[in-house]
Image: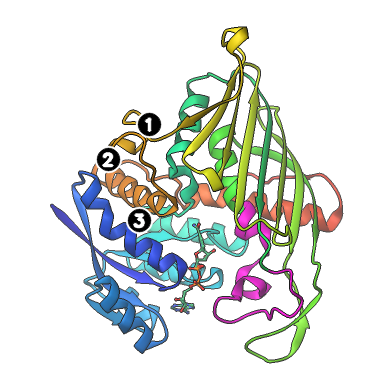
Amino acid sequence: MKTINVGLIGYGFMGRAHSNAFHKANHFFDLEYRPVLKAICARDAAKAQAFASQWGFESVETDWRQLVRRDDIDLIDIASPNDTHRDIALAAAKAGKMILCEKPLARDGIEAATMVRAVEKAGVPTMVYYNYRRIPAVTLAKQLIDDGRLGRIFHYRAKFLQDWTISKDLPQGGASLWRLDVKVAGSGVTGDLLAHCIDTAIWLNGSLDQVNAMTETFVKQRKHNLTGKVEKVGIDDACAFLARFKNGSLATFESTRYARGHKALYTFEINGENASLFWDLHDLHRLQMFDHRDEGRLRGWRSIHVTDGDHPYMKQWWVPGLQIGFEHSFVHQVADFLQALARKERPRPDFRDALETQLVCDAVLKSARSGRWTKVPAPK
Ligand SMILES: NC(=O)c1ccc[n+]([C@@H]2O[C@H](COP(=O)([O-])OP(=O)(O)OC[C@H]3O[C@@H](n4cnc5c(N)ncnc54)[C@H](O)[C@@H]3O)[C@@H](O)[C@H]2O)c1
């Protein structure tokens, strides 16, 4: 078995999800390559050391530049905040490393395009953690759509709702609250949450052609954790947009961190001439389907418990009927990346795919500023 030495940057939420995935992938999937947790990198040496001990990393770095310089690292995994993605990816590409990167790929399309150019010039394999593609029920939706079971698509509807920033006393910036600082995050819910919805939508229903958006920042000023000053909030707290897909179908997307009662309600629905599909992250192992071709007396929404051996990914796990969860989507992502390497295929979604999502986010924010329908630019 060939080994791949991983250097992971960031030990937060995603650092844990990725470490778990690197550990599990080879236990549950038959793979030619095996990731080795060679180094964890974060700025606080003591915390990084503690993380290394807990998760089994062989070494610790406190500067990502040093990590990227190391000859014994084959793959850089970027699980740090959005403002670090571009510089790390450019250095890693120059050093000839494979790169896995968290979403959104960058803070905007300009940064993302620079990253795509660099990795394509270097010829290094990449992948971006739009992990919802790898939830078995979502992958099943993709299979059913690709089989042509829905027929012509008319509508796509997606939401990603949370409620954790409603308090006006919540500060912005710094550890764990960097998502509220526009300089670090690039945008608010658009890049953080809608980017997931957009990636899934493009994957299931093809490219978006144009968008018409509105955004709102409900709390205009917050104390900044790093400067201690009350500063203007630059992120979008909520965003809703209409869209037209290139295949002629219509869409609505909505995201907010102000929907009291909702923690991570990601849902999508797709309506075709023959059938519709609905999925809900809070019930992630189920796919709802309505098929108009069913016998009339029995016709209705069916709830498919996506846990059987012939469902995507599921034969690798337990016995039919037993569910898996959020963290498994990262295991699938790592396994699929390693499988693509073995088959010399393009891992998906790669940086180029993620650039397309980034350009939709840019168009959404531009439309919200102008109040006009805005064309999504073609990735160059
Ligand atoms: N795919 C998903 O479902 C998903 C979910 C959450 C976050 N994300 C993405 O993952 C990334 C990280 O988010 P998170 O929630 O894990 O954040 P987090 O705040 O929990 O962790 C960030 C980590 O990065 C480290 N870090 C920050 N700056 C650094 C630097 N200059 N050098 C080295 N390490 C640095 C921090 O110490 C921390 O360990 C973001 O891009 C975010 O958008 C994706």
Cα separation, mark 1 vs mark 3, equals 32 Å
Name the residue furthest bottom: 228
Quick one: SS at disc 2? Answer: helix
Image side of residue 19 versus residue 230, left or right? left
Q: Quote the CA–CA distance across marks 2 and 3.
A: 29 Å
Task: Pick out the residue farthest to the right.
Answer: 371
- Near mark 2 (Cα within 10 A), the count class, few <14, some 14-19 or many ≥20, is few
Residue 184 part of the magenta segment: yes
Identify the amino acid type marked 2: Gln
The amino acid beneath tag 3 is Val
Identity of the residue drawn at 58% across and 12% down: 298
Q: Is residue 292 above or below residue 160?
A: above
Q: Which mark is residue 311?
A: 1
Give me the disc on residue 124: 3
**Horizontal arrangement in the rendering, residue 201 relative to residue 244 (left or right):** left
Packing grade of label 3 (10 A; few <14, some 14-19, many >=20) is: some
Going from N to C along the chain, the mark reached first, 1 or 3, is 3
* Image mark for residue 316: 2
Could one spot residue 380 in this view of the protein?
no
Q: Nearer the viewer, mark 1 or mark 3?
A: 1
Question: Which one is earlier in the sequence, the residue at label 2 or at label 3?
Answer: 3
Residues under numbered marks 1 and 3 in contact, where contact means CB atoms less than 8 Å apart: no
Q: At which x and y percent is residue 99?
A: 38, 60
**Mark closest to the chain's N terminus, 1 or 2:** 1
Q: Amino acid at mark 1?
A: His
